Amino acid sequence: MRPVRTYLRREPSVPAAWAVLLVIVLIWLAGSSVSVLSVTIMIGQKVPLVLASIGAAIVIMSRGIDLSVGAVLTVVNTIIAAGTAAFGNSLAWIGVGLAVALVAGLVNGLCVAWLRLPPLIVTLAVQSILLGVALYVLPTPGGAVDAWLKDLPLVLVGPFPLMLLIVVAAPLLIWYPLRRSRFGTALLSSGADESAAYASGINVRRTVVSSYVLSALFAGLAGIVMSMNTGSGDPTIGVPFTMNTIAAAVVGGVSLAGGRGTIAGPIAGALVVSFIGNLLFSMGVNSYWQYVVTGAVLIVAIAIPAGLRAIRAGRQPS
Amino acid sequence: MTTTPEPGGPGTATAVVAASHPRVDRVRQLVPVIVLVAMYAITVAIAPGYLEPPQIGSLLQLASILGIAAVGQTLVILIGGIDLSVGAVATLSNLVAAAILAGSDASLPVALLVVLAVGALVGLGNGLLIQYLKVPDLVATLASMTVVVGAGLLFTQGSPKGRSAPLLNALVTGRFLGVLTGGVLIWLAVSVVVILFLRRSAGGRYVYAVGLNREASRYAAVPVGRTVILLYVASGLMAALAGFLLTGYTGSAYLASGDSYQMQTIAAVILGGTSMFGGRGGYGGTIIGVLITVLLVSALRVVGIAQAGQDIAYGVILLGMLLLLTRMARRSA
């Protein structure tokens, strides 16, 4: 019981985000007719944001910010679609796309950690470069992907959609080993206090570089799933993703001040952010309200824990 | 990101009061000017048309709107903040202005007042979230940006209506003396006011003090909370004014018309030598940053580089400038 209570005390936003998600999904289920196929497709559509948010959250934990997430996703998507359309063999182009994504992450990380440039502007510049590359690779929406890739989101493993398993497996297989490793400790301590981490013998620079590379890797994986879902490419597809990944991380309790956060939180956050649209649609509300509700959720998600912490600390917010 | 003082930066009380570190600041001011002059020389060498008044005029016309939108961004970055809602506010202002004007000069004062009120309200919301609920600047303005985008969609129901008034069109696009427009004159006036405010007024001192060290400022009886909130209100107001002028420039309203200002204003402020960490820089630098941005985008287009190449070059130059500025400022510090 004790570890659970410690976890709840330390990360109150994570169960809160999952609870909100549960309520949203239940209301949504009550108000709409669902089939195995429609749910499978819908979960597949949520996976890119979930994956991209994991990456964005890792960078935020190291006290950075990554504005290039959406552009990395776009570049991978256009490389796969344009490459397959011209030469076939999606698998090879997935490799090329991921290689480009990793290079972009490495550039972000080196500029931030070694050249000590502000992450906001670095990743903004890299975003611009990547969007240019995407536009060069695929000037207009189109392209193609192999049939097997397109069918992947519809695959069922037993009664469960494959994509649902990916959402569940991502934290279990990637995050928990990572968090328990030296890197996990290094990541959170570098984010919490850079000089203290350095004094404790942690290679802060390498940790920060790794966080940007991981972010690009997850954004690249998101781009692959995006290509499966749409079966084509679009040089503007990723633009809204960047801001949504930050929103997902914040809703999931990752602190922008660095040093705190989980992966279960951002996953719930990403699902909350993207389910708001489904919910409003099934309730028959004008879909434009989606933006207003998302903004409100974002403010509430961050203001309530901040207020609680201020009260617990026993001082008035000045 | 918001409150970390720059390594080696001054945190002492005297530095807060004086708010300057002459050699570093001179480098910060000089590098952007050199880059602008060099870029202009190269552009003219490739496309001599850039020496002609009509070309300079159209550059200034674009620069005036971006420059006004960048006023607020400069002010909030000077206190170590950031405003992601600038683009969304400019777009909403464009949508609202066109709908109210509906092509009639008589509605100009009403439209301007409504638009400015909306901008101020968004800015006030940002300021209160940041100062009283302690929401990080990035998240607060990200949230308000999302709400404002939604408000624009709800207001227009997805199909913008209305168009600009003839007087506003003439003000923003009508040339006189070869290169000037009314919009450029408004930009000049705003620039003078902002620079005088930052350099000569007590309020300007507060901005630099809050940007360098909030804790020390509080002990020095600087009204930190009021300064933060008012600067975000100013940012909302200026973004709204930019959206209003944008209405005169485009003649009508488009969804997402001002969205590019979100990142362009941040880039212009940084290209102008203002530090992301707050407390260093000023609006004079931003003017240069705005001119660099506008010249770069226009020159790449004229030389015949496609959008893809423009995006790539823009990113590379932004990164290069940032590196140059940081290196030189650090060496002289």
Image (tube, coloured by chain):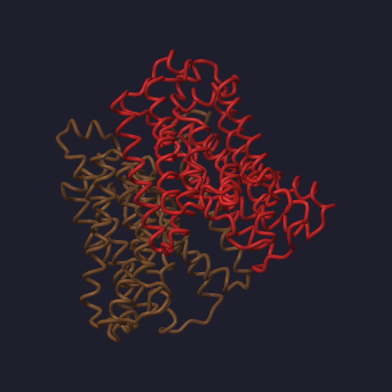
Q: How many numbered circles are shown?
A: 0
Q: Colour of chain A?
A: brown
Q: Which residue lies furthest to the bottom in this view?
A: A147
Q: Nearer the viewer, residue B235 or A163?
A: B235
Q: Residue furthest top?
A: B14
Which residue is pictured at 68% across the width and 52% down the height?
B173
- Whole-percent x and y of residue B88? 58, 53
- Whole-percent x and y of residue B133? 53, 38
Q: Which of B268 and B46 is in front in this view?
A: B46
Q: In this view, does B178 lie to the left or right of A107?
A: right
Res A40 seen here: no
Answer with the quarter of the image where residue A223 lies.
bottom left
Q: Is residue B186 left or right of residue B277?
A: right
Answer with the quarter of the image where residue B274 lies.
top left
Q: In this view, does A147 lie above or below A216?
A: below
Q: In this view, does A301 lie above or below B8?
A: below
> Which chain is tinted red?
B
Q: Nearer the viewer, residue B252 or A243?
A: B252
Which residue is pictured at 44% across the width and 40% down the height?
B36
- Whole-percent x and y of residue B6? 35, 29
Which residue is pictured at 33% across the width and 34% down the height?
B326
- Whole-percent x and y of residue A289? 61, 63
Res B219 seen here: yes
Q: Is residue B321 above or below residue B297?
A: above
Q: In this view, does A205 lie to the left or right of A256?
A: left
Q: In this view, does A178 lie to the left or right of B253?
A: left
